[in-house]
Image (tube, rainbow, N blue to C red):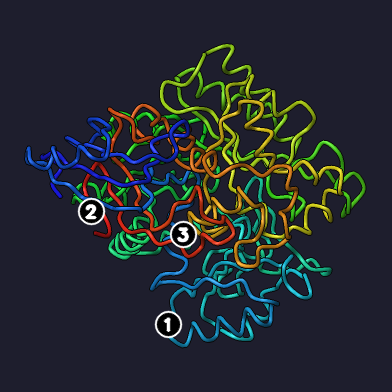
Amino acid sequence: MAASRTIVITSNHVYTDVAHPDRPLAVAIEDGRVRELLPRGQARELAVEGADVCDYGDAFVCPGFHDAHQHVLHTALFPSRLADRYVGTSERDYVHHLRGFAATHPGDGWLLSQGWRADLWDPPIWPTRDSLDAAFGARPVACCCGDLHSIWLNSAGLAALGVSEDTQPPAGGIFDRDANGRLTGVLREAAGMVYTARVFQSLPMEQLRAIYQDYFRTMLSRGVTAVCDMALCAVPGADNVREDVYESLLADGLLPLRVSMFPQLTDDLSRIRALKARLTGNVLRAPGLKQFFDGVSSAHTAWLAEPYANPRFPGDCGRPTIPADRMRALVLAAAAEGIAVRIHTIGDRAVHEGISIFREAYARYGAPRQGVNSLEHIENLLPGDVEALRGAHLVASVQPQHVIIDVTQPDRDLGPGRARDMWPFADYLGAGVPMAFGTDAPCVPALPMQVLSCAVTREAPETCRPVGGWNPHERIGMADAIHAYTRGSALVAGRAADLGTLLPGMLADMAVLDRNLLTANPEAIQGTRCLATCVGGVLAWGR
């Protein structure tokens, strides 16, 4: 296909937007945008006029999926030719698996892996450097936790990073110690993220370019045409949003899908100003910034209004990553320049405080010039805060796969009362709160069919359990799920004017799938194949 000519995509099942989810159409594309929508039968007339017509029969054509929340460096790296990804059943099992990976990657450089979750192990005990020391000796090892909030190092890894028993963790970070006060090798929150970034900084640019390209080809093969790359740490220099890699690929014409970068929000706004000034095209942009208000509930670092149901100490409510007045100052400074901000908020107290800050920012400065302010993840909320999200003009940026990572964890950590209203997708729809769907990859796989099925069924895609879904009253319909994963994500990325629907005037980014998602059993869509993916009307993957 060539973008300079009129291109026509036809199918019996075209989802243009949530108001028109399934109809036979001919989508005429010119100069990378949808020119018009015509009855399918008129495609023959356009072919006579010289248009290139591609008929997909009964395939399902929809806007390209737009992942609103990824950590691209980590997702491209784990797994790739450079690193491994594994969850494991125990510390011993994980180390045994890593031995096998190391055998195929000999040498004395960093051994990298990601995926372990101590709360899913048997026994659910956090690991220590001793097991890695026994297996790998003097070779440095860095194992990122599945939620990316912790890193597990051996003694050689600690030494390579300059961490000794006397080193103090960065602000917002934790060095785990054993009963004798000795470092265990696990670094949490800001500490884990800062030192992970230092490990990654040793990777050569050409290797990074290669794994990014491989990863983007994989995304296109799944119908994903745009991603938001989100900062993973608020510490300067450690957010892992690599504009140098993106701009290098863009300059060489090797960036095949659209990327919106959200670096960390700090006092110094010069980086985002510079990115906005030079990235004005349709492929690579930097719409706004990201901050962290708390951690994760499974580690008791999410900030709650009331103590955890299984407190680790009296009054255990988690904690804010940064004080609320500090967050307020950062957000208001960005809002004064019209810069959108997206805040990681998982606990109900963090969500509540975040809404309050954004309400003030909107009252004082109005909407951002590009993008929309959002809260990220939002696992549980205080009464009234769903409606308050709408009043503060916020997008709920959520990841449906998080619902089923471990359906026993919310009851255990938060108790049945708070757990019942977690991830309230149906409530957002009812209150008119826009949702943007993403994956938070690599915390969960970047698989569009899992995103959609988890939103619609709230069941684990692999097992279809719990039967009927976890908190089934918060299930939503497939058309609304697709809308959140296309139009909603475009909204939060500041691309609502040209992405997220297949209506006239919009950029012609689309996915062609081998089954109709609206009529297929949502429990059985994991086998759906992507037949073709177009970016700006140009075939980027498939046929």
To which residue does mark 3 refer? 75
**Marking on residue 254:** 2
Q: How far across and down, in percent of the image, does residue 119 sit? A: 74, 65
The residue type indicated by label 2 comes to: Leu
Question: Is there a contact, CB below 8 Å, between mark 2 and mark 1?
Answer: no
Q: Nearer the viewer, residue 138 or 213?
A: 213
Q: Earlier in the sequence, mark 3 or mark 1?
A: 3
Q: Compared to 142, does 34 lie above or below?
A: above
Q: Secondary structure at mark 2?
A: loop
Cα–Cα gap, marks 2 and 1: 28 Å
Identify the image quadrant of residue 480: top right
Q: Name the residue: 63% across, 23% down.
A: 390
Q: Compared to 216, does 123 lie above or below?
A: below
Q: How far across and down, in percent of the image, does residue 396 sit? A: 59, 34
Q: Nearer the viewer, residue 343 or 498?
A: 498
Cα–Cα gap, marks 3 and 1: 19 Å
